[in-house]
Amino acid sequence: MNKPILIFMFLALIFQSCTNTTNSGLPSPLVDGWADEYQELGAQPINLSDSVDLYFYQNDHYVWICYTYPSESFGTLDMKIETENLDEPLNLHVSAQVGEWPVNKPELAPKDPLSDRWWNMKGWISNEVWPNGIDRSGEVARPKFKNAPARELQLSKERFGRGKWEISMEIRAIKSSDGFISLQFPENKSAYILNVN
């Protein structure tokens, strides 16, 4: 083969590798507590209430779950997830601390805020309710918290697998005119089927 043909083939290979992308060049969401990018990425909101929208988004490696809530809410979460890749369904918990345990073994859940069973998540992450100092105005010092406008979870397809994910969520401490309420998704306590490719 002569030199000009080899150079042309080499350049063609470089050009092809530069133009082939697996996720169309779209950025991935950042788990920072802001939900702006989900609509920009084409995720359609699922309206859970007048003030709570839920989004799902995925790329080749991860699934993101995000929900918004009104200010002064905490938006804590217990999410049950069942996939073919998991040995048993898991409960993923997000509040001021994060952790997981088997749905059918609630005795493995952390018993108090000092438990070593917190922060045991594997293959997923979420923005927790942020600690924000100590309130010393009363007789007893109490922790203060600050919250982001949205709760975000990022789950690895390597751990949770591909195919059908069965998800049910209880979102707690949502501020409403009646005080704090909890929301179930789906409402009928069945599972939401998310197809993960």
Image (cartoon, rainbow, N blue to C red):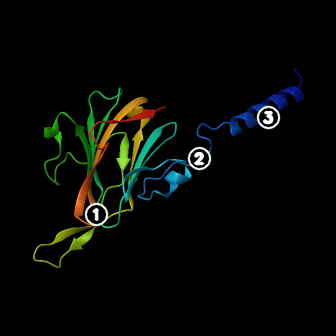
Tag in front: 1 or 2: 1
Question: How far across and down, in percent of the image, does residue 29 sit?
Answer: 49, 50
Residue 104: give x, y in percent of width and height: 18, 33
Task: Identify the image quadrant of residue 24.
Answer: top right
Distance between the alpha carbons at the discs numbered 3 and 2: 25 Å
Please name the amino acid that badge 1 sits on: Lys
The answer to whether 11 is drawn above or below residue 124 in the figure is above
Q: Quadrant of residue 68?
A: bottom left
Check contact, mark 3 vs mark 2: CB within 8 A. no
Helix, strand or loop status at disc 2:
loop
Residue underneath mark 1: 175
Furthest residue toward bottom: 137
Tell me the residue at 45%/33% (across/down): 196
> Pointers 1 and 2 in contact (CB under 8 A)?
no
Mark drawn on residue 20 = none
The amino acid sitting under disc 2 is Leu
Q: Nearer the viewer, mark 1 or mark 3?
A: 1
Q: Is residue 21 visible?
A: yes
Q: Earlier in the sequence, mark 1 or mark 2?
A: 2
Tell me if I can see residue 96 in this picture.
Answer: no
Please provide percent x and percent y for residue 98. Answer: 28, 50
Tell me if mark 3 has few (under 14), some (14-19) or many (20+) residues whose alpha carbon lies within 10 angstroms of its own: few
Is residue 30 shown above or below 188?
Answer: below
Residue that sits furthest to the top in the current view: 1
Q: Which residue is mark 2?
A: 26
Q: Which mark is residue 11?
A: 3
